Amino acid sequence: MTTAGTQTFKNFIAGEWVDAQSGETFESTSPATGETIGAFPKSGAADIERAVEAARAAYEKWRLVPAPKRGEFLYRFAQLLTDEKEDLAQLMTREMGKVIAEARGDVQEAIDISFYMAGEGRRLFGHTTPSELQDKFNMSVRMPVGVAGVITPWNFPIAIPSWKIVPAIVCGDTVVFKPATDTPRLGERFVELLVEAGLPPGVVNVVHGGGGAVGEALVKHPDVPLITLTGSRETGVAVLRSAADNLKHVHLELGGKNPIIVLDDADLELAVDGIVWSAFGTSGQRCTAASRVIVQDGVYDELARRLVERAEHMRLGPGWEPDTDVGPVINKAALEKIHSYTGIGRDEGARLLTGGEVATGNGLDSGFFYTPTVFGDVDPGMRIAQEEIFGPTTALIRVRDLDEAVQVANGVQFGLSSSIFTRDVNSAFRALRDLVAGITYINAGTIGAEVHLPFGGTKQTGNGHREAGQAALDFFTEWKAVYVDYSGKLQRAQIDTEP
Ligand code: NAD
């Protein structure tokens, strides 16, 4: 079913824009207004089959293209993203909802990683090392792996695809990309720009559709050795199970329950700035959002007062309006889930200090808006302090000292980002050492990753991989150890060791 006048988009397979084999479509709509963005192919296993076949065929040639040449496509891509930055950001604020400044930041992240990985084409360093035997040369080199299945969420609709697709390209892998069904237009634009950069047919393919019908077919396909997913913990578990039969390499970036610790000696104004940005930026829909604020007793009341005041002055509205602080959440189901946690928090005995309502009136009725919400007197064991809400809701937890703060911070199943506000260098370094998280910020909120550092989480936020920076190369390549014996005789390692 397509609404009359709606623009219809296609999958991109083997260098051609094609419909889903089913001929069916689904629509993407703006979370701020309900406006239809476009209709997209409702694909299935047959479309994945074609896309994987194209990616496999392309791989045999792409892996032989010298890495510096592969990087040159990415320089062109980065330049195209730069040229299109404003248009992409405007599209993002309409399709995904985040405020325009953040949408520009999302595109900038893709520009940054593309330039960074383009340069990797002339590095992709391996190691040389001495041999234990005479007249023998040893080295290790990175080898491409094959077809990468790339499955992404809606909350960073340009940045997250870039963190996966761009390193895959420079490493010599080819890609079948399944964007989130809430942001297909942005996924489609991303691929259009790769095509414009001159990427050969089959190197990147895009297949739209749901997690069950398309994502799972991709994860189960025996010719896709790499699966990289950013999404919820539940999806991560399902993907890992589906990939097990083929022992695929699976990279998971999942949820968070990220803490900000505020000690008595903190710069409170700075801490409040960091909390507001980290808890309510992107309407709390960041994997790194600060959904717990762990505050030392001496400043708890004052911090709570200032935070509530700031939260109450935030303006809700469509992301493209310049004075909007908080945009919509992604869809109705998300709005209902976020609101249900307000009920859960109340039932658990936490004190609702502000927010906790679906926002209506002032032109907000046709979108999905939720008021910035702060709970006080939260016990670390409560569900609102343990589970990912993925909305503009944060929980204040009172602690005695740094030791208790770190214990509370670590007392969840996730371990993505973390932060501490303190003026004491000893406390800062102890927190840095003891917080079990993939990222720790000192005197900044929980968000603000830069692309040349490893990104990812400990514990059930993932499965030990990292994206971005050098670390990304470890997932998209495999090491080969190479031994060149130029002695002209049989030399046995560990046996013929006498000189
Ligand atoms: P989601 O898990 O619902 O969906 C993510 C993607 O997986 C979508 O493309 C979806 O269609 C697909 N999918 C769903 N079920 C699947 C299945 N069985 N097999 C294969 N694919 C399947 O997540 P979402 O709502 O799009 O995104 C929000 C979640 O993503 C949050 O939990 C958030 O913390 C997490 N996230 C994590 C990071 C990180 O880097 N750690 C970054 C952003 C978002």
Image (cartoon, rainbow, N blue to C red):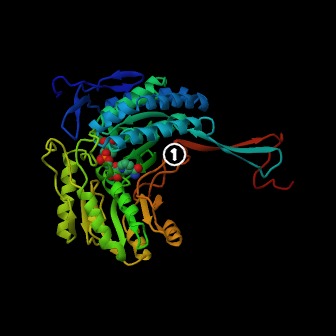
- Residue 255 x, y percent position in the rendering: 36, 55
Position of the N terminus, as image quadrant, is top left
- Tell how many labels: 1
Asked which quadrant contains residue 299, the reply is bottom left
Q: Residue furthest top?
A: 16
Q: Is residue 2 above or below residue 484?
A: above
Above/below status of 14 relative to 468: above
- Give percent across and percent down for residue 71: 56, 32
Q: Is residue 157 visible?
A: yes
Which residue is nearer to you in this view: 22 or 150? 150
Compare residues 497 and 175 and report the one nearer the observer. 175
Residue 144: x and y in percent read 56, 37
Which residue is located at x 49 percent, y 40 percent? 113
Q: Residues within 10 Å of mark 1 (few under 14, many from 20)?
A: many
What's the residue at 83%, 39% (across, down)?
A: 488
Viewer-closest of 318 and 305: 305
Residue identifier under label 1: 475
* Screen quadrant of the C terminus: bottom right
In the rendered image, residue 130, in percent from the top left (x then y), is placed at: 77, 49
Label 1 beta carbon less than 8 Å to ligand 1: no
Say which residue appears at 25% left-offset and 27% top-offset.
Answer: 22
14 and 392: which one is in front? 392
The amino acid beneath tag 1 is Phe
